[in-house]
Image (spheres, grey):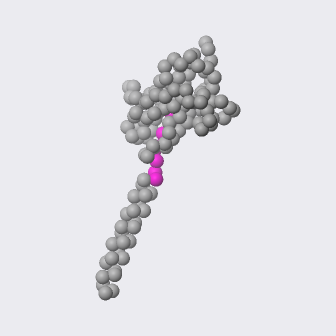
Amino acid sequence: MRTKVLPIAVVLAVAGSMLLAGAANAGTLVDTTVTIKTQNGDFWGTVDSPRPRLCARNRKVVLFKQLGDVQDPANDERIAMDTASLSGSRYEWNTGNTHIFGKYYARVGRTDSCKADTSKTVHSTRT
């Protein structure tokens, strides 16, 4: 009976270590960076990552109007959305000319593989 217990224990130990290794790899998210620029009510920027085909391509970018002194995506107003697409060698997003002015920022949410990111706040003014 003892000879049967040892092989089973070895199999369970190996399976357990494989599950832990898989969980550790699954928890590692890839960095993502979103940028924003504005001029006269037009907003655009880039989405970048060490793994751009995974974390930048077709990434949804949301433009927020900052209502208070600090960014608060849960309460700030969602204004526009675009999907980052390849332009030359970079993944870019663009809302077009919105004709809106004030404080704004861009945000990409977390995915199963990629981290979320929020741009700096920019001030859109009439020129």
Q: Position of residue 124 (x, y in %)?
A: 60, 21
Which residue is farthest top?
Answer: 127
Which quarter of the image is occupied by the N terminus?
bottom left
Q: Position of residue 107 (x, y in %)?
A: 53, 34
Residue 53 placement: quadrant: top left
Residue 14 vertical position relative to residue 120 in the rendered view, above or below:
below
Asked whether 30 falls inside the magenta stretch, the response is yes
Which quarter of the image is occupied by the C terminus?
top right
In front here: 111 or 119? 111
The magenta region covers 27-34
Q: Let me know if residue 124 appears in the view.
A: yes
* Residue that appears at 39% across and 67% down: 16
* Residue that appears at 63% across and 26% down: 103
Asked whether 79 falls inside the magenta stretch, the response is no
Q: Position of residue 94 (x, y in %)?
A: 47, 24
Left or right: residue 89 compared with residue 123: left
Left or right: residue 60 compared with residue 118: left
Task: Determine the main secondary structure of the stretch shown in magenta.
Answer: loop
